Amino acid sequence: MLGAHPAAPYPGPVIPPPRRTRLPSAAAAAAVAGALLALATACGPDEGRTALAIESTRWDGPGRVVVTFECADLRSLEVAPTGGPDGEPLVTAWGRPRVGRCTTEATVTVGPDVDRLTDAATGTVVDLPDRP
């Protein structure tokens, strides 16, 4: 048989030699320690506020809506007059949530054609009750 080669035996899988592991550098060790510390302390620094969800609304005179939020210490209120998806007011209440029962309210002034608000904390469109 001219030109025929006997098949070479299959050597099996090629396994690379083991690598030497290096000790982590001081910077890598510090990064890992910092990440673990952040996780242990509620995932980072305390911002002192969170967006609060709207629980209910009621009218308090012409063009004034009292908005009740989840139980919290209210820090600030932001109202973008046409920030909602359909041009309705976008309401963002910032505060520090509390455990227990409490009433957290703020008054929002709205135009005569407004019949709903958008809750920035949840993205929910909140229908206002019928005007008095």
Image (tube, rainbow, N blue to C red):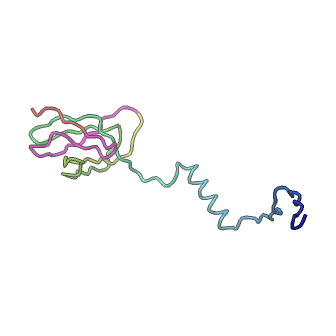
In this picture, residue 71 sits left or right of residue 83: right
From the viewer's side, name the closer residue of 125 and 42: 125
Relative to 126, residue 1 above or below: below
Residue 65 x %, y %: 17, 40
- Number of numbered discs: 0
Quadrant location, the C terminus: top left
Residue at screen point 20% across, 47% down? 86
Check if residue 110 falls in the magenta segment. Answer: yes
Which residue is painted at 27% across and 49% down in the image? 77
Front residue of 114/74: it is 114
Task: Give the quadrant of the N terminus.
Answer: bottom right
Identify which residue, 43 or 73, lies in the foreground. 43
Residue appearing at x 57%, y 50% in the figure: 39
Residue 82, image x and y in percent? 19, 51
Q: Quadrant of residue 14?
A: bottom right
Residue closest to the far front: 1
Which residue does the image show at 80% across and 64% down from the upper left? 19
Quarter-of-image position of residue 8: bottom right
Q: Quadrant of residue 25?
A: bottom right
Percent of width and height locating residue 44: 51, 54
Magenta segment:
100-125
- Compared with 96, 59 (above or below) is above
Q: Check residue 18 for magenta coloring.
A: no
